[in-house]
Image (cartoon, rainbow, N blue to C red):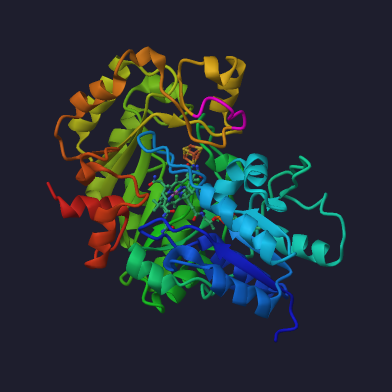
């Protein structure tokens, strides 16, 4: 038995296609380096977990049990699927099996940390990066010291410390040996890694700066490329990056591409990423394509300048056009994500956006109708200033008993008039370029929460970003 204190780390997500719990791979690596014994348990591929977990707890006697929470809900207006119910049952069961504290963390958790801690009945939460703060928390627990000054700590008494933000500037390449990366690749169709954290933009609805911080922390580009090599050695060759936006800041995107090329990996990997329409240019597009990038998902949100202004975006329609041209010239596949029905949206702005997309013809357009309201965002503050949630005619979903916005709640501008979804469906017509949330037409559904079409395609060998897998299944 190891003399190092064991820490049990659990991934409770069973969503399919299965996305590897990257946060736990990084966290376990940090714990290992700092004198702990990480013990991973993944619920993604097991049907019942109790007896196996019981055995593990008995054998390892963990000092703490960590649970990663990636998604609070699926952020989809059409489904509004809340995902914490089974995790609450898991926390209760764990508390009956061990006296070790149950600690919560993860990007979803960090969006609504106190409300999620209380809902789940866990002992401690940690909002933000875990690599430095979690070992610090564990050392304090073992020494029976106060937790009150540890960054990111959240306690049921209402303590919510400032977001934990790790210094990643000297962070070496992770070995990527703690989660089942090869299996996730086989069954989830893509590997994953981060090149940096945080986003310094001010889009009014976005949870990323809330959960990851507004200060961008870059990883050394050579370490990112080295990590790619390690995943390649496990047979993982197609990736989706996990940065909020790859091109913010542009210089780091360039450095990462150059490191991939310098290390000779560009002809062995294919990767996809999220990126913002600005800053983007033909040179960056060419460099990304050379470094193995196959496709980019741009959060363009709207093709109405007035709506983009209201959403706090810094790009405008001409930037969207220029970005698409740059990608076309570099032969990069393009997905544009729209975010419709936000504050001020009207039928006219929605019409302008859909006709703009039909004119531009990106490879695919993801249509999100209804804006999930996240705590800590400017949108949430605007709503709070307007009065009680129940009385706000723009809000849908859990408007009662949801002051901390933990449960799915969506903004759908009243200025859209009656039956706005029906109107939108008419605008989209049967143009296969558009994905939108519809259980009735599964081929056009791009909710990745339990998407059986994707699961089947991946089983048959499809690899890549999910939108690209869906696109190539029904090529136009
Ligand atoms: C990339 C990405 C995707 C990619 C994933 C690609 C891949 N192969 O991994 C794709 C496109 C597939 C995707 C899909 C979805 N996504 Co997504 N995605 C992201 C994104 C940008 C990165 C996630 C990530 O891996 N981060 C990097 C890892 C390292 O960070 P981390 O998990 O937070 O871990 C760190 C800390 O949190 C902490 N930590 C983690 N666990 C623990 C545990 C303990 C005990 C402790 C102490 C600490 C700790 O330490 C870690 C290291 O510092 C995030 C936003 C963001 N910037 O993070 C959205 C995000 C997580 N996604 C989101 C959503 C909603 C989804 C979907 C449900 C959408 C849908 N309906 O289809 C699906 C779900 C897919 C699934 N099976 O889970 C939302 C979740 C919001 C919410 N309400 O909870 C986010 C936050 C985006 C947003 N702003 O709305 N996604
Ligand atoms: S939408 Fe993109 S650019 Fe805007 S704050 Fe979120 S991650 Fe940053």
Q: Nearer the viewer, residue 311 or 103?
A: 103
Q: Nearer the viewer, residue 332 or 422?
A: 422
Residue at x 37%, y 28% (from the top left corner): 316
In screen coordinates, is 14 left or right of 270?
Answer: right
The vertical placement of 319 against 35, above or below, is: above
Residue 281 drawn in magenta? no
Query: Toward which corner of the image does residue 16 lie, by quadrant?
Result: bottom left
Residue 401 drawn in magenta? yes
In screen coordinates, is 272 left or right of 180?
Answer: left
The percent position of residue 14, horizontal first and vertical second, equals 44, 58
The percent position of residue 230, horizontal first and vertical second, equals 46, 76
Residue at x 61%, y 17% (from the top left corner): 385
In screen coordinates, is 434 left or right of 280?
Answer: left
Q: Main secondary structure of the magenta part?
A: loop
Q: Residue furthest bottom?
A: 1
Question: What stretch of residues is rendered in magenta?
Answer: 398-404
The vertical placement of 213 against 386, above or below, is: below
The percent position of residue 294, horizontal first and vertical second, equals 29, 57
Image quadrant in which the N terminus is located:
bottom right
Residue at x 35%, y 52% (from the top left corner): 450
Query: Toward which corner of the image does residue 257 lie, by quadrant?
Result: bottom left
Q: Is residue 434 visible?
A: yes
Q: Residue furthest left?
A: 476
Residue at x 61%, y 40% (from the top left corner): 112
Q: Nearer the viewer, residue 313 or 456?
A: 456
Query: Toward which corner of the image does residue 345 lie, by quadrant?
Result: top left
Q: Is residue 332 visible?
A: no
The percent position of residue 245, horizontal first and vertical second, equals 46, 46
The vertical placement of 258 against 381, above or below, is: below
């Amino acid at each position: 038995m190891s003399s190092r204190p064991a820490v049990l780390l659990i991934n409770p997500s069973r969503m399919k296609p299965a996305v590897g719990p990257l946060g736990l791979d990084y966290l376990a690596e940090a714990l290992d380096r700092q004198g702990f014994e990480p013990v991973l348990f993944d619920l993604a591929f097991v049907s019942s977990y109790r007896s196996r977990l019981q055995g593990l707890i008995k054998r390892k006697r963990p000092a703490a049990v960590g649970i990663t929470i990636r998604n609070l809900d699926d952020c989809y207006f059409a489904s509004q699927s809340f995902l914490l119910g089974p995790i609450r049952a898991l926390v209760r069961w764990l508390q009956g099996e061990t006296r070790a504290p149950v600690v919560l963390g993860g990007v979803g958790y960090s969006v609504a940390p106190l409300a999620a801690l209380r809902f789940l009945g866990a002992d401690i939460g940690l909002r933000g990066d875990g690599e430095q703060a979690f070992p610090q928390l564990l050392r304090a627990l073992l020494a029976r010291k106060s937790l009150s000054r540890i960054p990111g700590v959240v306690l049921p008494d209402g303590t919510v410390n400032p977001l934990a933000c790790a210094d990643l500037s000297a962070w070496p390449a992770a070995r990527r040996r703690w989660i089942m990366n090869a299996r996730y690749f086989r069954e989830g169709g893509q590997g994953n890694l981060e090149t940096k954290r945080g986003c310094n933009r001010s889009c009014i609805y976005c949870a990323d700066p809330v959960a990851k911080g507004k200060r961008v922390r870059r990883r050394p580009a050579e370490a990112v490329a080295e990590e790619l090599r390690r995943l390649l050695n496990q047979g993982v060759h197609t990736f989706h990056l996990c940065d909020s936006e790859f091109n913010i800041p542009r210089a780091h995107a360039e450095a990462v591409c150059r490191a991939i090329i310098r290390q000779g990996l560009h002809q062995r990997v294919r990767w996809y990423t999220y990126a913002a329409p600005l800053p983007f240019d033909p040179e960056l597009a060419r460099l990304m394509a050379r470094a193995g990038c196959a496709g980019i998902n741009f959060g363009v949100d709207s093709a109405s300048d007035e709506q983009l202004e209201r959403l706090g975006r810094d790009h405008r329609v001409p930037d969207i056009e220029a970005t698409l041209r740059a990608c076309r010239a570099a032969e990069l596949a393009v997905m544009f994500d729209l975010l419709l029905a936000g504050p001020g949206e009207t039928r006219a702005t929605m019409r302008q956006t859909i006709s703009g997309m039909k004119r531009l013809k990106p490879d695919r357009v993801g249509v999100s109708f209804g804006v999930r309201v996240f705590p800590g965002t400017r949108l949430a503050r605007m709503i709070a200033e307007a009065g009680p949630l129940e009385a706000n005619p723009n809000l849908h979903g859990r408007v009662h008993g949801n002051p901390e916005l933990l449960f799915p709640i969506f903004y759908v501008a009243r200025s859209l008039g009656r039956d706005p979804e029906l109107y939108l469906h008419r605008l989209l017509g049967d143009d296969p370029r558009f994905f939108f949330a519809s259980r009735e037409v599964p081929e056009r559904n791009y909710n990745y929460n339990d998407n059986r079409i994707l699961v089947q395609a991946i089983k048959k060998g499809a690899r890549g970003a999910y939108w690209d897998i869906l696109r190539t299944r029904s090529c136009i």
